Amino acid sequence: MKIINALKYGFKLTSLNIKLWSLLYLINLLFAGLVVVPLLSYLGDKLEFTKATDRLIGGFDFTLVNDFLNQYPEFLGLVTTQTVVVGILFILLYIFLTGGILTRLKNIETDLHRFENFWAGCGKYFWRLLRLSFYFILIHLAVAGLFFAFFNWSVKGGLDYFTSEAAIFFRAEVSLFFYGIFALFFFMVHDYAKVLVVMNNRRLVFQDFWGAFKFGIKNIKITFGLYLLLFGLFALTSVLYGVADSFIHRMGIPSLCLFLTGQVYVLLQIGFKLMNLGSVVKVLKGCD
């Protein structure tokens, strides 16, 4: 029941923050435009707007892409560099906006119709949330390394010890499954720690990290159950989007429909993120 109440509260906060939802979508759209437009311009110049562009729009064409990379090998380096730079910038932007989102959710009664505290929260908590994210990156790397070491130990000897590759593959599946569970748990703890950083307004974020970890363990049924439910909704919408995308390609529906479907998917994911943070706020307040 607590999980449902927290989910309802998260949905309520999200529905009350349509302006915030819209703002985050516009920022996401502008950021994507800054990334995609130069890349499309480069492709347009190289392909000279031939029918090859139509083949790309209609779906992935391996032969066309392979020929293009052979003719313009520098494109792969350009995409790789751009992907790394864009990824880092997007993470920094997301961390920056998270401070404002949590400030708004914390002060929902006073901040519902104005954005001054949102932007102030973005700047106020950026460096604290950045440090917190750095700590969790180290934790995830340590957890991944631990499970990788466990997998290597479990398949020591290789085919000289096991009768078939199926046994090795099974151990890989088991290791990946348990790694996924542990990774999701620490992602959940990270979200709780972010909320505590804003709620407690402390500069030493390690206290909030440790507090979130203890809170998550103590209330594991509601915290992890809620997180798994929200993750399931995210996975379900991703699968439905993939099915819709495949259907649009097969039926030859105009690309505008594909674009609109993608934007609906982006809006839903932003909504799920707001629901998740709002639910975390409710759980922390309700279980004090």
Image (cartoon, grey):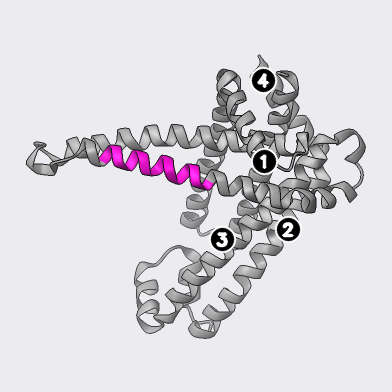
Which comes before the other along the chain, label 2 or label 4?
Answer: 4
Q: Which residue appears at 73% of the width and 58% of the height?
A: 27
Q: Which numbered tag is attached to residue 4?
A: 4
Q: Position of residue 87 (x, y in %)?
A: 56, 60
Give the structural element (helix, strand or loop) at label 1. Answer: helix
Kindly report the distance in space between the C-alpha atoms of the residues bearing marks 4 and 1: 29 Å
Q: In what quadrant of the picture does the N terminus appear? A: top right
Amino acid type at mark 2: Ile
Are the residues at dot 2 and dot 3 in contact (C-beta closer than 8 Å)?
Answer: no
Q: Position of residue 76 (x, y in %)?
A: 43, 74
Identify the magenta region.
137-151
Amino acid type at mark 1: Val
Q: Which numbered tag is attached to residue 205?
A: 1
Q: Is residue 254 visible?
A: no
Q: Residues within 10 Å of mark 2 (few under 14, many from 20)?
A: few
Q: Which numbered tag is attached to residue 27?
A: 2
Q: Which residue appears at 66% of the width and 67% of the height?
A: 33
The one nearer the camera, 239 or 169, is 169
Give the structural element (helix, strand or loop) at label 3. Answer: helix
Amino acid type at mark 4: Ile
Amino acid type at mark 3: Gly
Question: Which of labels 4 and 1 is toward the front?
Answer: 1
State left or right for residue 120 relative to residue 282: right
State left or right for residue 157 relative to residue 150: left
Residue that carries the numbered disc 3 in the rendered image: 87
